[in-house]
Image (tube, grey):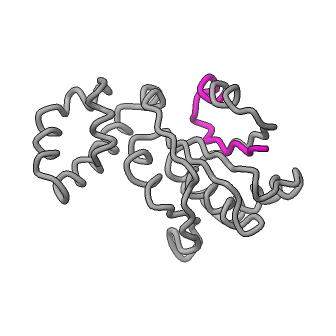
Amino acid sequence: QCLLLIDNNVPNKMISKIARSLKKKIFKFKFDASEKNKNLNYVNKILQVLLNKNFSRQDCVITIGGGITGDVGGFAASLHKRGLNFVNIPTTLLAQVDSSIGGKTGVNTKEGKNLIGSFYQPKMVIIDTEFLKTLPKREITCGYGEIFKHSLILNKNFFKYLNENFPKILNLKSPFIEKAIFES
């Protein structure tokens, strides 16, 4: 069985497409993915679903949303029965190039951001640029900023590529957006 942990901002048609592709029993848990809700309370709510539906270590949590969704869902997956399968489907450009990489999961506390968490690698990260078409321009610009930062640090040729193609990338033109994501 699979628990789909879904950011409320993800369009229903995209969720339906994912659900239809799965050959398992599916439960859905939607939440308002915000810094305010990135906490142990929400992790506990997810764990209660996993416990009540008798999820085993062979079952999975699939997160569908931005970085907060992946952080909270991945952390819950790491805790349930000492770790069950975790699949991350990042839906923002920033999550696709940053937070979905490296297995960082966790939550905030009143003492600070990301103070409780674990490193828990997803079994798979699925990046679909169709999600990006549903986002406001500001979200694309923020993600592009992270890509640009990576190019400054890592690769002069990639920096040149971004500089030459940034209008196409910001307008999500293929194959430019895909190259920007996978090179960063």
Picture mark count:
0
Give the percent coordinates (x, y) of residue 139.
38, 39
Q: Quadrant of residue 81?
A: bottom right
> Would you place residue 114 above or below residue 139 in this image?
below
> Residue at 69% across / 50% down in the picture?
61
Give the x, y percent position of residue 143: 34, 44
Image spot of residue 4 (x, y percent): 69, 42
Apparent side of residue 90 relative to residue 1 in the rendered image (left or right): left
Foreground of the two, 26 or 10: 26
Q: Quadrant of the N terminus?
A: top right
Identify which residue, 71 or 122, lies in the foreground.
122
Horizontal side, residue 167 vs residue 134: left or right: left
Q: Is residue 9 magenta?
A: yes
**Residue 140, image quadrant:** top left
Is 6 positioned to the left or the right of 144 in the image?
A: right
Q: Residue at x 11, y 46 (%)?
A: 157
Q: Which residue reaches farthest bottom?
A: 111
Q: Quadrant of residue 56?
A: bottom right
- Segment colored magenta: 1-15
Residue appearing at x 20%, y 28% in the figure: 167
Give the vertical position of 172 relative to 90 (above or below). Answer: above
Q: Position of residue 121 (x, y in %)?
A: 54, 60
- Residue 65 shown left or right of residue 77 in the figure: left
Residue at 67%, 25% (x, y): give it.
16
